[in-house]
Image (cartoon, rainbow, N blue to C red):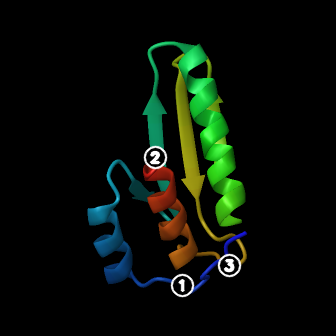
Amino acid sequence: MAIENKTVLGEAQIEAALRTLNGWRREGNTLVREWKFERFAQLMPFLRGVLDTMDRNNHHSDLAVDSRTKTLRVSVTTHSAGAITQADVDFARALNAT
């Protein structure tokens, strides 16, 4: 299990990270990415990979599955810090690598 780096990031650090995080955007104190699938059945194996990434990184994001639009939304923040931390960026990078 990975050790999380819960260093709170400043505005410049968050903006720099977002430039390297394909598909991610900021919504307040949260990093968000959505994936859309042609068929709902395609979403489920991907979701299993997201769950594995959450466990490997010991960082658990908020997930929203919309079966109507076949969309998975992942929102990540460090609730204990009330902010975006390096752990959130690390998780987003890990998820992009799956």
Q: Residue at x 65, y 64 (%)?
A: 57
- At mark 3, the secondary structure is loop
In the rendered image, residue 36, in percent from the top left (x then y), is placed at 45, 27
In the rendered image, residue 22, in percent from the top left (x then y), is placed at 32, 52
Give me the disc on residue 8: 1
Nearer the observer, 32 or 93: 93
- Please state which of the two labelled residues, at mark 1 or mark 3, is closer to the viewer: 3
- In the rendered image, the vertical position of residue 56 relative to residue 8, given as above or below: above
- At mark 1, the secondary structure is loop
In the rendered image, residue 56, in percent from the top left (x then y), is placed at 67, 60
Measure the alpha-carbon separation of dots 1 and 3. Answer: 15 Å
Q: Is 62 displayed left or right of 31 in the figure? A: right
Q: Residue at x 58, y 59 (%)?
A: 76
First-in-chain label (1 vs 3): 3
Question: Which quarter of the rendering shows the N terminus?
Answer: bottom right
First-in-chain label (1 vs 2): 1
First-in-chain label (2 vs 3): 3
- Please state which of the two labelled residues, at mark 2 or mark 3, is closer to the viewer: 3
Three-letter amino acid code of the residue under disc 2: Arg
Residue ID for mark 2: 33
Three-letter amino acid code of the residue under disc 3: Ile
Three-letter amino acid code of the residue under disc 1: Val
Measure the alpha-carbon separation of dots 1 and 2. Answer: 20 Å
Q: Is 65 displayed left or right of 12 in the figure? A: right
